[in-house]
Image (spheres, rainbow, N blue to C red):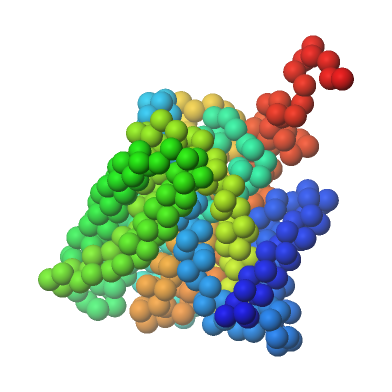
Amino acid sequence: MQEMLITVSVCLIGGLLMSRLAKKVGLPAVTAYLVMGLLLGPFFIGHLQIPYIGFHSLEDVEVYKIITQTALGFIAFTIGNEFRLEQLKSMGRQAIVVGIMEGVTTMIVVDIALITLHVIRPDFISLASAITLGAISSATAPAATLMVVKQYKADGPLTKLLLMVVALDDAVALICFAASYGVADALEQGSVNVVSVVVEPILEIVLSLVLGVLAGVVLNWIELFFHSRSKRMSISIAFVLLTVGVSMMEFNIGGVKISFSLLLVCMMTGTMFCNICSASEELMSRVDGWTSPLLILFFVLSGAELDLNVLGKPVALLIGVTYIIFRCTGKYTGAGIGSRITGCSSTIQKHLGITLFPQAGVALGMAVTAANLSDGAIVRNVVLFSVLVYELIGPALTKRSLMAAGEIHPEGRTVARKENEPRAGVSVK
């Protein structure tokens, strides 16, 4: 037990110290946390086997998975706050069209590239794995995006649309993966399982949304019994923890797997809560302050679990580079087309796609499922390599795009006046 406490402390202190160094060179704090995790991981400091310092193996990192799952729950809950009715009325159609367009376009572009590679070199990647990787490419990581937005207090049309698209992306990716993996499995097994391809993914999305709505309503009802700000914040935190725990449960009813999407459940809880609770904005800001250490741990642990063994596999690197290039092409093109269709500004059309490059947890989860394919190991290795690249450079690209769009001040502040700065024409004595 004491070893876990010391390790968590080292992760927090190391991540914060690294963020100071990152600030001096203009990199987002999230990149610093990931690098610190990589250094503490089993390929660097952890390899030295120093007691209480670093992670000695990838299995050691897995012990802390509950922390990363909890952090994802709070991230999704916070993003749900972006779906307020006034924003849905003004940007809801844009977010839905762009979210579907960028996800589906990316899947198609990566499918074409990897199927072509399969035709040229069938010994490198099977058709089933190529199709599966195309679906996995549609997923986007909300965590890194949200951290960059929060650190630099980004605000504006691009930021608002980005957060909504990232939230919707999980549902699009689930549908794309379910359909593609069903086809891939059919190619190898010779038969199509309608339950796993159609029924289970639809049930997962619908049940996740229903559970999220119920959780949001109950949370608001319980909040009415308390008037103290600290107690209401505590109830909010407890409820997010509860929804994370429930969403991790799985059942099997009549041969049909019943499961939930953690991101969708917590996002819908936040959406419902912010639209029916009059004090939701204040409570959300307080919850954000409480969860800061948790989010730092999330990224340090994410960096520690990056498997550098993949760098020693030439075939995985070749497919990985192809995957990265065409996934970026698909995200940029799809977001641009969706933005134009919905009449978004030229600034959004130009920069939105770049902010959707980061990829992590959801993609890795899909890769675990894909491991059942005959050459599923190549899918896992490609996704691991791409996550390594995306997580290290993605946050910096997101920051650059938001800054180019004028939604982050060049010095790292928003254009809006800081609270401690005087208003124009008011003297400070």
Residue at 28% over, 69% down: 250
- All told, the count of numbered labels is 0
Q: Quadrant of residue 312?
A: bottom right
- Position of 98 relative to 124 (above/below): above
Q: Position of residue 300 (x, y in %)?
A: 64, 65
Q: Is residue 258 left or right of residue 331?
A: left
Residue at x-position 77% and y-position 21%: 422
- Check the image and report above or below for 75 versus 10: above
Residue extending farthest left: 254
**The quarter of the displayed image where residue 33 is located:** bottom right
User: Relative to 183, does residue 42 appear above or below in the rendering?
Assistant: below
x and y, in percent, of residue 400 in the image: 69, 43
Q: Nearer the viewer, residue 304 or 285?
A: 285
Q: Is residue 40 visible?
A: yes
Which residue is drawn at the image coordinates 22% and 57% (left, top)? 203
Q: Nearer the viewer, residue 18 or 289?
A: 289
Horizontal relation, residue 369 to residue 15: left or right: left
State the image quarter where residue 98 is shown.
top left
The image shows residue 81 at horizontal and vertical percentages of 45, 39
Q: For the view shown, which residue lies furthest in the top direction?
A: 425
**Quadrant into which the C terminus falls:** top right
Residue at 57 percent across and 51 percent down: it is: 290
Identify which residue, 269 or 127, lies in the foreground: 269
Position of 145 with respect to 140 (left or right) is right
In terms of depth relative to the viewer, which is nearer, 148 or 181? 148
Indicate whether 275 appears above or below 369. Answer: above
